Image (cartoon, helix red, strand yellow):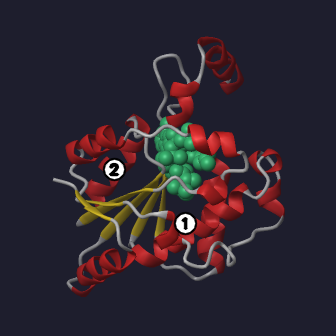
Amino acid sequence: MTTIIQSIEECKLLCRSFLTINKKIGFVPTMGALHQGHETLFKRSVSENDVTIASIFVNPTQFNDPKDLENYPKTFYKDLEILNNNSVEYLFYPEYQDLYPDGYTFRVSKNKFSKILCGSFRPNHFDGVLTVVLKLLNVILPHRAYFGEKNYQQLKLIEQMCKAFFLDVERIACPTIRDYDGLALSSRNILLTMDERKQFIFQNY
Ligand SMILES: Nc1ncnc2c1ncn2[C@@H]1O[C@H](COP(=O)(O)OP(=O)(O)OP(=O)(O)O)[C@@H](O)[C@H]1O
Ligand SMILES: CC(C)(CO)[C@@H](O)C(=O)[O-]
Ligand code: BAL
């Protein structure tokens, strides 16, 4: 059974207790609405570590469009079933106030590479991503953290941040899992109309 942890303090205590007995922690950060793409990250972490912790947190600071944040799919009970079925031991499920006691006055800011590609049409998106990932890594102190290659720019920026701040975590890049028609699996796909879906498949190739 996956155990849900909401408090930062409880999560820190638990993770540090694993470290003192030399247990390797694998961490898979997500925004929920889990699918088979996420499942490959869970499976890999479970097979490579003593304990796996997933997080679900729809991080408001990485959304530049309030409608996108409002419409982001939420499927908590199905997510819990997926975590259980994949033998993920812990779900870290914090609230905004817990993760941002400073009200986002402190942040990780990356110039240059965060401003191009995806970052050019989602202003400040990657500052929000990097800030929340740094917070989560500091709470959990995992040996390994798992990220999808689907979000390639995100993956590269997280790798650069870990190097810049001397974080010990090993970053594991996982291949993109696609749907029957070739479209990369994505939590937001359930919001697409058939026409939008066809257009995205076309853009994929
Ligand atoms: N199809 C996929 N294959 C492999 N990894 C994936 C896939 N989709 C997402 N991931 C990875 O899972 C992690 C959590 O991603 P997230 O919860 O944002 O889901 P998402 O499907 O990318 O959602 P969105 O609709 O926001 O793009 C990220 O590291 C992401 O790269
Ligand atoms: C890494 C992440 C969990 C940070 O909110 C998010 O950007 C995601 O799910 O890709
Ligand atoms: N998986 C990417 C996170 C985002 O779109 O905000």
Residue at coordinates 56% horizontally, 26% vertically from top-left? Answer: 191
Mark 2 or mark 1, which has the lower sequence index? 2
Dot 2 alpha-carbon crowd within 10 angstroms: few under 14, some 14 to 19, many 20 or more: many
Q: How many marks?
A: 2
Tell me the quarter of the picture where residue 103 sits. Answer: bottom right
Residue 65 lies left or right of residue 180; in this view the side is right
The residue type indicated by label 1 comes to: Val
| Residue annotated with mark 2 | 42
* Cβ atoms at labels 2 and 1 below 8 Å apart: no
Secondary structure type for disc 1: helix
Dot 1 alpha-carbon crowd within 10 angstroms: few under 14, some 14 to 19, many 20 or more: some
Q: Is residue 46 above or below residue 13?
A: above
Q: Is mark 1 within 8 Å of ligand 2?
A: yes
* Of marks 2 and 1, the one in the foreground: 1
Residue 168 lies left or right of residue 122; in this view the side is left
Is residue 141 visible from the viewing direction of this image? no
Secondary structure type for disc 2: helix
| Residue annotated with mark 1 | 133
Q: Is residue 48 above or below residue 121?
A: below
In front of the other: 2 or 69: 69
Pick the quarter of the image with the C terminus. Answer: top right
